[in-house]
Image (cartoon, rainbow, N blue to C red):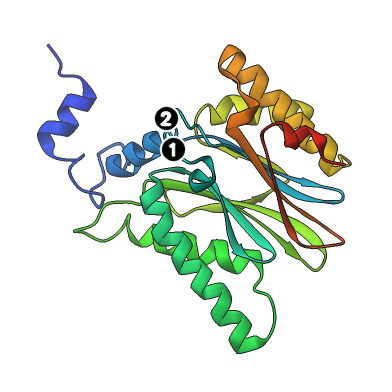
């Protein structure tokens, strides 16, 4: 009787290190980390004609937690925001790094850092942890949105260190279903108000009876003002 492939991998030790390829060409520790990401709380990021936004599920179940302390959307610079899915403590290390990078860029060049330089720095560091022994991959995906030359940019970096620019994307729990809905309903001429409403409707459709708007937050940047603004709960649908 043939042994299942996953058991063969375990016996041969292919899943014990991030640097050993299986005969099928997989890095199993990286794939395990990707599964961890899909257990994390979800968020949707979108580029609209008048700005950019992230809608994130804070997924707070414990009533003893102070809601304001459990934000899932982080400010990297005055023109860049970020959401994460996966191991938040892993993400905190990466966020600290790019916050410092952004401030160093301001001090050195007296100008705002480009969002792509931020996502490239994150992705390069993630890639290193899939290549060198003695360390595990970062168990987190990051979605970074920022303004560049008056236009919004949306980037997502996965566990492997790959990144791409998107019009809209989703990370975390049920990401494949969320992205499928985005492919069906997203339009480039959506306003911020319309885009946020669409993202809320998609979450509501996917989560069904588990949906609770009070557990969501949104951060957005308008093309004209280029200032980060935040809304939570019922306020989200009151955006003017």
Identify the element where label 2 is drawn.
loop
Instruction: Using the image, tell me which numbered label, if any, was put on residue 65.
Output: 1
Q: Position of residue 51 (x, y in %)?
A: 81, 52
Question: Marks 2 and 1, Cα distance to the nearest angstrom?
Answer: 6 Å
Q: Is residue 25 left or right of residue 203?
A: left
Quadrant the C terminus occupies = top right
Instruction: Look at 74% across and 36% down and name the residue there.
Output: 235
Q: Position of residue 99 (x, y in %)?
A: 52, 68
Identify the element where label 1 is drawn.
loop
Contact check, label 2 and label 1, Cβ < 8 Å? yes
Nearest to the observer: residue 226 or residue 182? 226
Q: Is residue 172 left or right of residue 126?
A: right
Instruction: Using the image, tell me which numbered label, if any, was put on residue 62.
Output: 2
* Count of all numbered marks drawn on residues in the image: 2
Q: Position of residue 30 (x, y in %)?
A: 34, 44
Q: Would residue 1 be visible to someone looking at this image?
A: yes
Instruction: Look at 84% across and 39% down and name the residue there.
Output: 193
């Amino acid at each position: 009787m043939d042994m299942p492939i996953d058991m063969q991998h375990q016996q041969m030790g292919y899943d014990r290190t991030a640097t050993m390829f299986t005969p099928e060409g997989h890095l199993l520790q990286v794939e395990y980390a990707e599964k961890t990401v899909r257990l994390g709380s979800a968020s949707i990021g979108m580029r609209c004609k008048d700005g950019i936004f992230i809608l994130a599920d804070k997924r707070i179940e414990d009533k003893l937690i102070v809601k304001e302390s459990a934000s899932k959307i982080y400010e990297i610079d005055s023109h860049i925001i970020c959401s994460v899915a996966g191991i938040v403590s892993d993400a905190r290390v990466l966020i600290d790094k790019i916050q410092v990078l952004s401030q160093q860029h301001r001090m050195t060049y007296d100008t705002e850092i480009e969002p792509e330089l931020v996502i490239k720095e994150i992705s390069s560091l993630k890639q290193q942890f899939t290549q060198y022994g003695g360390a595990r991959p970062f168990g987190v995906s990051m979605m970074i949105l920022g303004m560049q030359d008056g236009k919004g940019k949306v980037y997502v970096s996965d566990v492997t260190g790959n990144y791409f620019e998107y019009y809209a994307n989703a990370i975390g729990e049920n990401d494949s279903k969320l992205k499928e809905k985005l492919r069906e309903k997203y339009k480039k001429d959506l306003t911020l108000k319309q885009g946020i409403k669409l993202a809320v409707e998609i979450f509501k459709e996917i989560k069904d009876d588990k949906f609770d708007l009070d557990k969501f937050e949104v951060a957005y940047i308008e093309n004209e003002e280029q200032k980060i603004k935040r809304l939570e709960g019922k306020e989200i649908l009151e955006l003017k």
